[in-house]
Image (tube, rainbow, N blue to C red):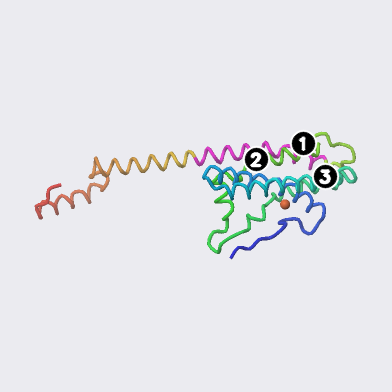
Amino acid sequence: MARVEAYPGTENNPYLRFVYTSFQEHATAVSHGSTARLAKAHGDDVLTRTCGTIAADEKRHETAYGRIVEQLLRLDPDGGMLAIADMMHKRITMPAHLMHDGRDMNLFDHFAARLNVYTARDYADIVEFLVKRWKLETLESGLSGEGRRARDFVCGLAQRIRRAAERAEDRAKKDEQRKKKSTTCKTKLQCNSPEKALGPSAWSQLLATCCSENIKL
Ligand SMILES: [Fe+2]
């Protein structure tokens, strides 16, 4: 049975909670929008409409929470900035990330990334969107030294995530190519050179058995 935690990493702290929900509502809009596109491509009209309606709803929720964080940053720039950086350090985890079926502890990750419903690139886009929306790059007044460091960390985060995603994709491509190459080699060896495939000792034993039992190779 699936278990879900509503606001991972927010420690019952209202600052963290509003940062979390601003991000998470946007992420949910993205993932439902992607699911709607997939459903449309596969001809499921009911699922397309359902996911489209949910995605539009999530965008409205995101607008509301985002405005609250805007006000937090206006009234308490340092506290607001530190809360944003704190949540980004912890990484915003979707409630669905904690869903599991008793066998796969990364059920959402595996499905969402494989189907392109919600990926690391979407995560980077959302960070960038919020940085712009909350005008963090130009936030200066009311920030302590720690607040300025937090701002710089958050403003450079999207770029770092994209670079990490590119490296992970390159690694996955290389692994895939290596796997293909090794399968081709094994197949070739088995088809063209049984001696190499078996090794000289096993090959000579096989020949001896075939000779003694009059089997033609
Ligand atoms: Fe929502």
Please tell me which residue is depicted at 18% across the width and 49% down the height of the picture: 204
Which residues are the magenta region? Answer: 148-172
Residues 158 and 52: in front is: 52
Q: Which one is in front in this view, the residue at disc 1 or the one at disc 3? A: 3
In 3D space, how far apart are the residues under numbered discs 1 and 3 (Cα atoms)?
13 Å
Q: Nearer the viewer, residue 130 or 81?
A: 130
Q: Which amino acid type is marked by label 1? A: Lys
What residue does disc 1 label?
132
- Label 1 vs 3, first from the N-terminus: 3
Q: Nearer the viewer, mark 2 or mark 1?
A: 1
**63, 80: nearer the viewer:** 63
Q: Which residue is mark 3?
A: 67
Label 2, ligand 1: CB separation under 8 Å: no
Question: Viewer-proximal residue, 71 or 91?
Answer: 71
Q: Residue at x 61, y 40 (%)?
A: 164
Q: Say if 174 sits above or below 110 in the image.
A: above
- SS label for mark 3: helix
Does 66 sit left or right of 163 as displayed?
Answer: right
Q: Is residue 33 left or right of residue 110?
A: right
User: What kind of residue is marked 3?
Assistant: Arg
Query: Mark 2 — residue?
Result: 161
Q: If you read the primary sequence from the N terminus, does the residue marked by circle 2 or circle 3 appear first?
A: 3
Taking the view exactly as shown, the residue that stands out farthest to the front is 45
